Amino acid sequence: MTLQTILGNFALILFVLMVFTGVIWCVDRFVLARQRRVAADAALKALDARNARLTAEGIKADNSNRAAIEAAILRQPTWVEYSGSFFPVIALVFVLRSFLYEPFKIPSSSMVPTLLIGDLILVNKFSYGIRLPVLNKKVIEVGDPQRGDVMVFKYPKDMTQDYIKRVIGVPGDKISYENKHLTVNGKPVEYAAMDDYLEEESLELRQQYSEALPNTTHRILTMRSRRAFDPSQVDNFPHRDACIYTEETFTCTVPEGNYFMMGDNRDNSADSRYWGFVPNKNIVGKAFFVWMNLGNFKRIGSIH
């Protein structure tokens, strides 16, 4: 699932705009504004001298336009005014988006029933550590992804794309998948059958289960018409030698510094089964809240 960021995937663009408008704001505040003040003081001094001469000559001086002259000289050029006005807004958006929360829109169905097409979600950017904007390099440790977390990350095959999946395996875990059932570190994951789910996009009934990972319980979907796994679709990805594939199953040991991700719509999700592990450097943040769905206001709430 390729995520669509509400603000656009424009961290670099926002950074450049912030620097550009910030430089203009600083130059105006510490240089141009002082120059305008000096020019205004000189003009007012000249006006006062002129009026003094007129008074000495017995001519009544007009001081009514003194304030207007000062205001006209001190007024910022239009381009400076607009740049200075945009700077704090751009800076605020950049800080919020880079260090706190980033909004995304769900465009596809690989995380149904947890996330639906059109869900507008918030991603916590500091749950898994503070990272430098643009470079995405972690500089402060805060926490690590846990099994069951819904995580946004850079797609390993194309770092310009943001993906969202559920964390199934953390570093060192041994993940097996057979007959559409997971085994984590030798312990079978428990499943409980639920009522079939009508997927709105395809209008097809899907089998629905409650899946109990070690840290969370959530819903998943499967399709009767699809096999559990198609090894012909597996890419050649880094650490592929950590996985063993058969016609219907696979077993992977998650390398250090990597995570194994799967979509909740299991038979309609391209994920770590096919394109491999997600390195720590690719992590964007933890999805935690649906703040709007224009087609269904009941969607608002926490993500589980």
Image (tube, rainbow, N blue to C red):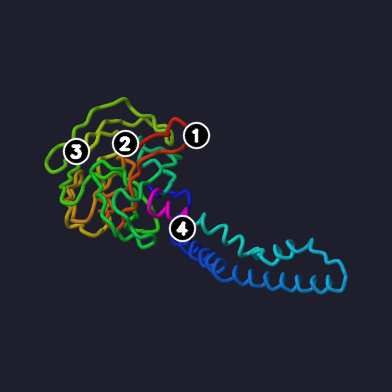
Expressed as whole percent of the image width and height from the top left, the position of residue 80 reads 61, 64
Q: Nearer the viewer, mark 1 or mark 3?
A: 3
Per the model, the C-alpha gap separating discs 4 and 2 is: 28 Å
Mark closer to the chain start, 2 or 1:
1
Secondary element under disc 3, as helix, strand or loop, is loop
Mark closer to the chain start, 4 or 3:
4
In the rendered image, the quadrant that contains the C terminus is top left
Start and end of the magenta stretch? 92-101
Q: Which mark is residue 304?
A: 2
- Dot 4 crowding, Cα within 10 Å, few <14, some 14–19, many 20+: few
Q: Is residue 228 above or below residue 256?
A: above
Q: Is 37 situated left or right of 211 in this image?
A: right
Per the model, the C-alpha gap separating discs 3 and 2 is: 14 Å
Q: Amino acid at mark 2?
A: His
Q: Amino acid at mark 3?
A: Pro
Q: Amino acid at mark 1?
A: Gly
Which residue is disc 1 drawn over? 295
Secondary element under disc 2, as helix, strand or loop, is loop
Which residue is disc 3 drawn over? 214
Which residue is disc 4 drawn over? 10
- Determine which quarter of the picture holds residue 64: bottom right
- Determine which quarter of the picture holds residue 58: bottom right
Per the model, the C-alpha gap separating discs 1 and 4 is: 27 Å
Per the model, the C-alpha gap separating discs 2 and 1 is: 20 Å
Q: Which mark is residue 82?
A: none
Q: Residue at x 27, y 54 (%)?
A: 278
Secondary element under disc 4, as helix, strand or loop, is loop
Q: In the rendered structure, does residue 244 fall within the stretch colored magenta?
A: no
